[in-house]
Image (cartoon, rainbow, N blue to C red):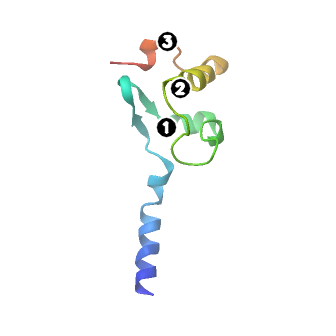
Amino acid sequence: MKKSIVALFAVVAFAGTAFGADVIEMKKGVSFNHKAHKAAVGDCKKCHEKGPGKIEGFGKDWAHKTCKGCHVDMKKGPTSCKDCHKK
């Protein structure tokens, strides 16, 4: 019983880490504000098609198509190389 209580406490205490960091530093000098995107987009499935966690297939091609495409469609957010790649 004591182990169950400790395990439950650990799950509750660290549950916030399952929802992603506020800002994620990626390759090539790209800084991604996850918290701002969650607020602006609202629907997690637009990026996380298979549920919370890492994005399946994420990489340069995916980001350029999906992220940049969304920014163009919404007429909001960076669309040029230097806007995302601050290196």
The residue pinned by badge 2 equals: 63
66 to 81, vertically: above or below: below
Task: Describe residue 67's horizontal placement relative to residue 32 as left or right.
Answer: right
Secondary structure at numbered mark 1: helix
Q: Amino acid at mark 3?
A: Ser
**Residue 31's quadrant in the figure?**
top left
The label number, if any, that marks residue 26 in the structure image: none
Q: Nearer the viewer, mark 2 or mark 1?
A: 2
**Residue 26's quadrant in the figure?**
top left
Q: Nearer the viewer, mark 3 or mark 2?
A: 2
- Asked if disc 2 and disc 1 are in contact, CB closer than 8 Å, the reply is no
The residue pinned by badge 1 equals: 34
Label located before the other in sequence (2 or 1): 1
The residue at 57%/48% (across/down) is 52
- Residue 23: x and y in percent read 42, 37
For the residue pair 47 and 75, the one nearer the viewer reads as 47
Secondary structure at numbered mark 3: loop
Task: Describe residue 22's horizontal placement relative to residue 66 as left or right.
Answer: left
The residue at 60%/36% (across/down) is 47
Measured Cα–Cα span from mark 2 to mark 1: 14 Å
- Asked if disc 3 and disc 2 are in contact, CB closer than 8 Å, the reply is no
For the residue pair 22 and 54, the one nearer the viewer reads as 54
The residue at 43%/74% (across/down) is 7
Q: Residue furthest front?
A: 57
The label number, if any, that marks residue 80 in the structure image: 3
Secondary structure at numbered mark 2: helix
Label located before the other in sequence (3 or 1): 1
Measured Cα–Cα span from mark 3 to mark 1: 19 Å
Q: Where does the C terminus fall, quadrant-wise?
A: top left
**Residue 22's quadrant in the figure?**
top left
Give neighbour class at mark 1: few <14, some 14-19, many 20+ (Cα, 10 Å).
Answer: some
